[in-house]
Structure formats: structure tokens, C-alpha cells
Amino acid sequence: MIVAHRHNRFFAPAFTLIELMIVIAIILVLASMTIGGLGWYKRKAAVEKTRILRSSIGQALEAYRLENGFLPQGGGDDDSTAQVYIALYGDGELAYDSTSGQVTVRTQPDGKPDSGATTHLNTLEPGLTGSRMNVTSSGGTYIIVDAWARPFHYRHDVTGQDDQMMNPPDDFDLWSLGPDGKGGPTGTAKERRDDITNYQ
């Protein structure tokens, strides 16, 4: 006896539960790889932005020293770039006392370059926000920040007596704590690994 099988057009072949689970697993793996790649890219971009800013600050400080005969003073703490901002953005004025060997703030900054002042680094604009921000203010003090909105650190003693210096005493130390926000000259080797510095 011959049995004729007719094609049932109402029931099309479907995915099995296992096939659906495999497809979902592949989608999840691809999504996690994409998200991880974006995180890596953002970190790399932030590191590069901070390196460029560190280099620009260094070059501008050398130009300031050539013009004025001294460098801003800083002890390496969180607000140690306050005088660096004044010097490089032309917002406020520094005074050097050759007798005491100290640099003090003669005119307080107000967030914009003074009329007639030399601006050695015009990208240090306090009004920038988001990923473009590189200066923040607190209580009238302006400090330079890295791509993670954390303070840059600056060390220089005009008298050359600072034995904490990583560079020679007549130079300056400039560093960002990098992506992990830890390290600095006194940090552990592991913490210092991702620091962005002008010294080795």
C-alpha cells in the first residue's frame, strides 16, 4: 500500500531549544567582546590625552622659565599645579623673591587670562567640561587635571633643596597617577606601573 505524504504548509521547520541557546550564547560572547573592546579603547584614549597634556605642560613650563627666569613652586600634593596654571594660562600673576627663594601668588586667578598676559598654554581653559576638561577650580584655586579628572601633581623647589625630586633638583617633576589613580613617586612598583610622568 502506498501512502502519500502531503506537505503541511502550516508547520514550517523550527529551531530546537538547544540551537536557540547556542545562538544566544554566541550573541552574548560577541557583545561582551565589543564592550570590552570599547573599554580598552576609552582607556587608551585617556592615557594618550594625558600624555599629550603632560608633554604640553612641560614644554610650556620651559618657555615660562626662559621668559621669567624661574619656575612655579609646587610640593607634589593634589593642588600642586595651582601656580602652574597661573604661570601657563596667564590668569593671575606669580612673584619670585630672590632673597627667600620663594614663589608666591601676587594676583589671584579668576578663570580667564589677564589682559596683556602671556598665555603659554591656551588649552588650560577652566570653562571646558566633559572629556575636554583639563582644569578644575575649588575655592578660587585652579588646578590642572588629567583625563580621569584627577589632579596632575607637580614638584619644584626654586631653591633646589627638595631631596624628594625624581628629576634633578633644578628641574621639575610632573605626573598623573594614571588609570588606577594610585602610585606617584612614593607608591609601590605595582601602583606606579601605569603612572604618566616626566621622569623614569
Image (cartoon, rainbow, N blue to C red):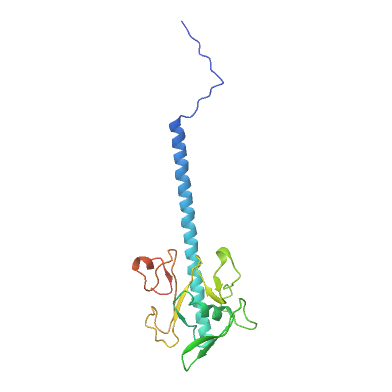
The quarter of the displayed image where residue 180 is located: bottom left
Q: In the rendered view, would you say 125 is above or below 10? A: below
Q: In the picture provided, is 91 more to the left or to the right than 40?
A: right
Q: Which residue is at the far bottom?
A: 99
Q: Which residue is at the far front?
A: 139
Q: Which residue is at the far left?
A: 189
Q: In the picture provided, is 67 more to the left or to the right than 196?
A: right
Q: In the rendered view, would you say 136 is above or below 91? A: above
Image coordinates of residue 134 in percent, x first then y, are: 54, 70
Number of on-image labels = 0
Image coordinates of residue 150 in percent, x first then y, are: 49, 68
The quadrant the C terminus occupies is: bottom left
Which residue does the image show at 45% across and 49% down from the upper left?
33
Image coordinates of residue 22 in percent, x first then y, are: 44, 36
The quarter of the displayed image where residue 163 is located: bottom left
Which residue does the image show at 43% across and 32% down from the upper left?
18
Q: Name the foreground residue: 151 vs 69.
A: 151
Image coordinates of residue 97 in percent, x first then y, are: 50, 91
Q: Which residue is at the far right?
A: 115
